[in-house]
Amino acid sequence: MGIIAKYSIKELEVLTGIRAATLRMWEKRYQIITPLRTQTNIRYYGNEHLKLLLNVNVLNRSGIKISHIAKMNASEIIEKVKDLSFVKTGDEDLFDGLMLSMIDLDEALFHQAFYKAVARLGFEDTINRIIFPFFSRIGIMWQIDSINPAQEHFISNMVRQKLIAAIDNTATIMDAKAKKVLMFLPETELHELGMLFLNYLLKNKGYRTIYLGQAVPLNDLSRILQISDPDILITSVFNSISLGDITAFVNKLIVVPSTKKVFIASAGIYESEATFPSHFKIFETLRDLAAEF
């Protein structure tokens, strides 16, 4: 059984981008949605309300008056949205398409929203302006316990496939003199979308990248360095990390010779008071790290 979401009107405001005052007006004047109530008479909204509002918002932003939308039933609204195909709308409607695809595990709708974004913005801006901010919204849904892990895995894997396809499409003929970059996530680190995107960016800039992926045992690092002989090593720690864990983590990276650069992206490490060898550089985010190149 899926999670039964319970949203407050303020949470709907965050997830849909529709002001709470507007939602109340739509509810009162046009009966667009009718809230549910808990046993203690507290108003709340469910996933069906969220899906309906996302679709209503697409139509409204495309120029259809809310009074006209209010006369449509749910099926007519969905069909009208499909007809629009997000052609005449802005970035917010791309968020809406992604949200709807995640809620319903709808692969076709995900592709539709993604390709429209790429056609409008280009691949890099789609990832930076649409995809990563969208995952921030997913974080909000986790906080209010309104998302099933399968839904988050679905959308993550859809994005992962797009990133890998983009990496595969980059030029494979590289200058042998180009700097070599070894990239990986250490043990326990599984969220790799940011690192995959960085891999794509570096390849496009002519770097030779060696991407090892998730959960790489640091005890094997010495052998990996002997085989790959990189100029730069990049890793990232997304999970919260204690000062003791930071020390242990850095000690395992000490095997990297001082002639090579070590770049680490981690808010926890960046904000800590830990000390590092001179060839280490710590960044708060992967975006900050990417700006180094």
Image (spheres, rainbow, N blue to C red):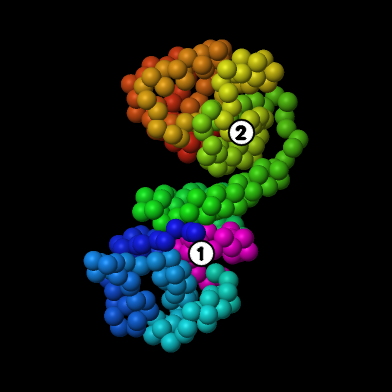
Q: Is residue 64 above or below residue 231?
A: below
Q: Residue at x 59, y 63 (%)?
A: 106
Membership of 2 in magenta stretch: no
Mark 1 belongs to which amino acid?
Answer: Leu
Quadrant in which residue 83 is drawn: bottom right
**How far from the left and from the top, in percent, is residue 85?**
58, 71
Instruction: State left or right for residue 1 relative to residue 167.
Output: left
Earlier in the chain: of badge 2 and badge 1, it is 1
Choose between 144 and 83: the one closer to the eye. 144
Residue occupied by mark 2: 213
Q: Residue at x 29, y 74 (%)?
A: 24
**How far from the left and from the top, in percent, is residue 218?**
56, 21
- Magenta residues, as a range? 87-114
Q: Residue at x 65, y 25 (%)?
A: 180
Instruction: State left or right for residue 224 relative to residue 128.
Output: right
Choose between 245 and 229: the one closer to the eye. 245
**How far from the left and from the top, in percent, is residue 160?**
60, 46
Membership of 110 in magenta stretch: yes
Residue occupied by mark 1: 100
Mark 2–mark 1 Cα distance, whole angstroms, equals 29 Å
Quadrant in which residue 261 is drawn: top right
